[in-house]
Amino acid sequence: MSTRPMVMVRHRIASATLGVLALALVVILPVVVRLLGNWTGRLDKLASASRRLAGGDFEADLGPVRVDEIGQVGHAFEEMRSAVRARDASLREFNSSLQHKVEERTRDLARALDEAQPPAAPRASSSPI
């Protein structure tokens, strides 16, 4: 019995398998590249918004947030941004209030010092009359 027909069958199976794999690669690779590009783009947007927030820009909006894992991070970022903005506004208000209190207390202290000083005694004249 000849092994030639078996070798040919194996060769055809190998060729068909390679063809299917090549076709799958041609179909799947663009989908994977697109998905990765989408994910990395969303992560870049999140990183950029984080840098803007660190610089004091509380309006760094991420746009619509999805429900996947990156979306969960985006939602947490939005919550953090809102909390940081509220704390910043509160601190600015407190700072302004404190500034006014310091100015008021400084005026009160200056007034109290002026009132506490005895009136100056008239100086004796050194010129003979």
Image (cartoon, rainbow, N blue to C red):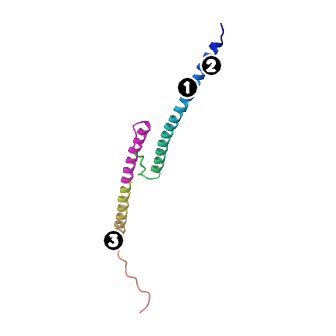
Pointers 1 and 3 in contact (C-beta within 8 Å): no
Q: Which residue is mark 3?
A: 115
Sequence order check, earlier mark of 1 and 3: 1
Q: Quadrant of residue 18?
A: top right
Residue depth check, mark 1 versus mark 3: number of the one nearer the observer: 1
Magenta stretch, overall SS: helix
Residue depth check, mark 3 versus mark 2: number of the one nearer the observer: 2
Q: Quadrant of the C terminus?
A: bottom left
Sequence order check, earlier mark of 3 and 2: 2
Q: Position of residue 46 (x, y in %)?
A: 46, 44
Which class describes the residues within 10 Å of circle 1: few (<14), some (14-19), or many (20+)?
Answer: few
Q: Who is closer to the viewer here, 9 or 84?
A: 9
Q: Quadrant of residue 9?
A: top right
Q: Which residues are magenta?
A: 64-90
Q: What's the mark number on residue 11?
A: 2
* Residue at (42, 36) in percent of width and height: 68
Q: Which residue is mark 1?
A: 20
Kindly report the distance in space between the C-alpha atoms of the residues bearing marks 1 and 3. Answer: 99 Å
Pointers 3 and 2 in contact (C-beta within 8 Å): no
